């Protein structure tokens, strides 16, 4: 099979694009400095939560300054504060395949009420070992991680419905369900491989997650997704590629087809079917890890069953809309009326109208079936196409004023266009090769607008050279005027994929400053220095230790023998904002602990040699920080 001219052009553009860029200065607004300068001691206007990609974490920046405010540990261990190392947080990273201390974090979703960000929770996906996390935005802490059965590469996730009824997770890799093995040839793929859309139910009050049901789709790769809103509330839209159902994605194999699909799922209908007992129970095994708010300790629960729905049987559950050439992004505008598909290899942007889609179903305007699922005629659902917008459209966000902003990876630019008449209105270059873009609230019913941020894949010459690898790059543009205006570059951690931003007011006043020591229900708390002690239970030694400016109690520990399991339970007695204490002990094959005020954390250490082991506080906490130290004596067995 021949490569299409477009593909060749795309490949060529990829290799030369950085030299073809016009000079940056021309694109920077003259007042850019004033518009991004946040004076010392002043707060930013917005929180920007940015996915950390292969770092596995989530980073929090202020906008418009681009200042890094926090790295939130989610899917990777974090020696900086002991996440994944402390006894309390280790269970957060348990999976059906054991302890998995790393992942690839792509997308984020802020919880919504009535289609607007409500500032309660942030959901994050793990792309590699399929998981979804819930982060609490009062304490900026990962509270829950749920594993997804029947998934392989949780890419299309976590996107959510307009009242956070569900967080949705679509599998990027089709896999045999029930963790079965299969030969890898195309015929076996067609027969055995399935694609799964998981609907994670979210408890309104607590935010607790459970896998409510899964829709088992024919083998194809779900890429990205968005919930309907307003008129399209009750529907969910996924982009797919590889509808050729090939087990190898070499160009000749997987991009043969002119069109792949947008998969439209009627989740209200799915709920009805589940209620009516039409879902099948499938035996499986997955982990649900929860950090308990009272005792600040995570526990893992193993779940052995999942409800599944089969759209080949339940005919009105799923419909397919043809979408040109390897669709990637699939975005719903603030009115809920328009669905934007983005074929990575397409030279146009198709926009579908929800009303026409509904009418097409009523009129049975189908062009056929795909593995038993009706395929709607392209024209029947189409609102129109944006012609010649750029090369390699990926993702679209909205400003709430009728405009859409689409990122173009290959031509490395953001293109602004009008949803109503599908005309291109403006374009700006990005440096270089933008992936996602984000308008604050741009995925909600009421975008905040004002800015668009580009999260770029390649940094090249944007910063001082730092060897072969450079920090990833984000760029902030103003969208207040008719023309977009570049204001700022700022580096990011890991690789940024999707991001979310929310006005600071919705979060800052609810921020926890410390945990109430009187409410600390940790089983090994020492709520005051009088409660400190060293207790032996068989070969375990439990040290109930307190930390307060400026001493650790007890600071001399004897009676420990080589091979003992020593547990240092450190309670930080401070009741003051931003006074964590750290704890580290010489030669411990683990990380430090960083204990928040009012909290108890535990470090486990098994000494292998006799001797004297100094320990100390690692966080410079007061003038007498250096005095926060002590010794543990370890005797031969
Ligand atoms: S993405 Cu995951 S490959 Cu376009 Cu959301 Cu970056
Ligand atoms: Cu406590 Cu330094």
Image: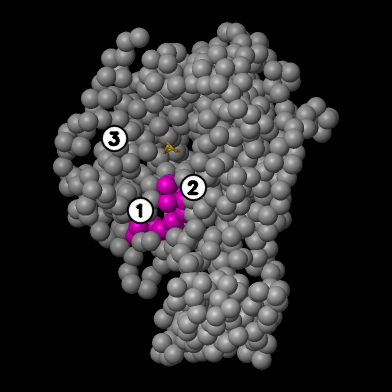
Q: Quadrant of ligand 1?
A: top left
Q: Residue furthest front?
A: 637
Q: Is residue 550 above or below residue 482?
A: below
Sooner in the amino-acid sequence: mark 2 or mark 3: 2
Quadrant of residue 275 within the rendered picture: top right
Tell me the number on the disc at residue 115: none
Q: Which image quarter holds the N terminus? A: top left
Q: Secondary structure at mark 2?
A: loop
Q: Position of residue 177 (x, y in %)?
A: 65, 29
The residue nearer to you, when weighing 375 against 35, is 375
Cα–Cα gap, marks 1 and 3: 18 Å
Please indicate, yes or no, whether residue 226 appears anywhere in the rendered image: no
Which residue in the structure is indicated by mark 3? 412
Q: Position of residue 226 (x, y in %)?
A: 55, 35
Sooner in the amino-acid sequence: mark 1 or mark 2: 2
Identity of the residue drawn at 30% across and 30% down: 410
Number of numbered tags placed on the structure image: 3
Segment tinted magenta in the rendering:
50-66
Identity of the residue drawn at 55% across and 21% down: 183
Which residue in the structure is indicated by mark 1? 492
Tell me the number on the disc at residue 103: 2
Name the front one of labels 2 and 3: 2
Quadrant of residue 560 within the rendered picture: bottom right
């Amino acid at each position: 099979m021949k490569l299409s001219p477009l593909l060749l052009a795309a490949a060529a553009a990829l290799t030369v694009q950085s030299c073809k860029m016009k000079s940056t200065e021309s694109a920077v607004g003259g007042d850019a400095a004033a518009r991004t300068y946040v004076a010392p001691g002043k707060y930013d206007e917005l929180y920007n939560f940015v996915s950390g990609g292969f770092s596995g974490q989530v980073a929090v920046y202020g906008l418009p300054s681009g200042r890094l405010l926090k790295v939130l540990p989610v899917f990777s261990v974090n020696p900086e504060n002991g996440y994944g190392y402390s006894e309390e947080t280790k269970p957060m990273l348990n999976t059906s395949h054991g302890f998995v201390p790393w992942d690839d974090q792509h997308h984020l979703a802020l919880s919504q009420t009535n289609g607007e960000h409500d500032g309660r929770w942030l959901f994050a996906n793990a792309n590699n070992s399929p998981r979804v996390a819930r982060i609490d935005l009062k304490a900026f802490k990962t509270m829950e991680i749920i594993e997804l059965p029947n998934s392989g590469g949780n890419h299309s996730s976590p996107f959510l419905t307009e009242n956070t009824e569900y967080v949705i997770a679509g599998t990027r890799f089709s896999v045999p369900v029930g963790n079965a093995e299969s030969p890898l040839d195309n015929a076996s793929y067609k027969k055995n491989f399935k694609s799964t859309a998981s609907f994670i139910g979210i408890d309104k009050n607590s935010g607790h997650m459970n896998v409510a049901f899964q829709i088992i789709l024919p083998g194809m790769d779900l890429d990205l997704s968005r919930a309907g809103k307003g008129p399209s509330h009750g529907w969910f839209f996924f982009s797919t590629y590889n509808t050729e159902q090939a087990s190898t994605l070499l160009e000749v194999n997987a991009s043969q087809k002119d069109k792949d699909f947008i998969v439209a799922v009627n989740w209200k209908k799915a709920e009805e079917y589940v209620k009516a007992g039409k879902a099948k129970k499938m035996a499986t095994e997955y982990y649900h890890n929860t950090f308990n708010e009272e005792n600040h300790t995570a526990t893992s629960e193993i779940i052995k069953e999942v409800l599944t729905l089969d759209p080949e049987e339940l005919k009105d559950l799923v419909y397919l809309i043809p979408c040109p050439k390897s669709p990637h992004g699939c975005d719903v505008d603030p009115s809920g009326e328009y669905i934007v598909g983005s074929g990575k290899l397409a030279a146009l942007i198709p926009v579908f109208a929800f009303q026409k889609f509904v009418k097409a179903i009523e009129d049975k305007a189908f062009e056929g079936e795909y593995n038993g699922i009706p395929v709607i005629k392209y024209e029947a659902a189409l609102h129109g196409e944006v012609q010649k917008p750029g090369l390699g459209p990926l993702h679209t966000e909205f400003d709430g004023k009728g405009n859409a902003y689409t990122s173009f990876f290959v031509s490395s630019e953001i293109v602004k266009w009008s949803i109503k008449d599908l005309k291109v209105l403006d374009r700006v270059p990005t440096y270089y090769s933008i992936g996602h873009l984000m308008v604050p609230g741009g995925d909600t019913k009421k975008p905040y607008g004002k800015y668009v941020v580009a999260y770029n894949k390649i940094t090249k010459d944007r910063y001082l050279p730092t060897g072969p690898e450079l920090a990833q790059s984000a760029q902030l543009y103003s969208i207040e005027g008719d023309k977009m205006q570049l204001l700022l570059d700022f580096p990011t951690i890991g690789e940024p994929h999707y991001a979310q931003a929310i006005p600071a007011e919705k979060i800052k006043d609810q921020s926890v400053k410390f945990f109430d020591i009187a409410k600390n229900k940790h089983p090994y708390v020492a709520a005051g220095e009088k409660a400190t002690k060293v207790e032996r239970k068989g070969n375990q030694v439990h040290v109930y230790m307190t930390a307060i400016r400026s001493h650790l109690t007890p600071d001399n520990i004897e009676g420990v023998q080589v091979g003992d399991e020593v547990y240092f339970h450190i309670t930080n007695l401070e009741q003051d904002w931003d006074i964590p204490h750290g704890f580290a002990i010489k030669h411990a094959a683990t990380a430090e602990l960083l204990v928040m005020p009012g909290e108890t954390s535990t470090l486990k250490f098994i000494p292998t040699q006799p001797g004297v082991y100094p320990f100390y506080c690692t966080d410079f906490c007061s003038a007498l920080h250096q005095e926060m130290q002590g010794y543990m004596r370890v005797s031969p067995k």
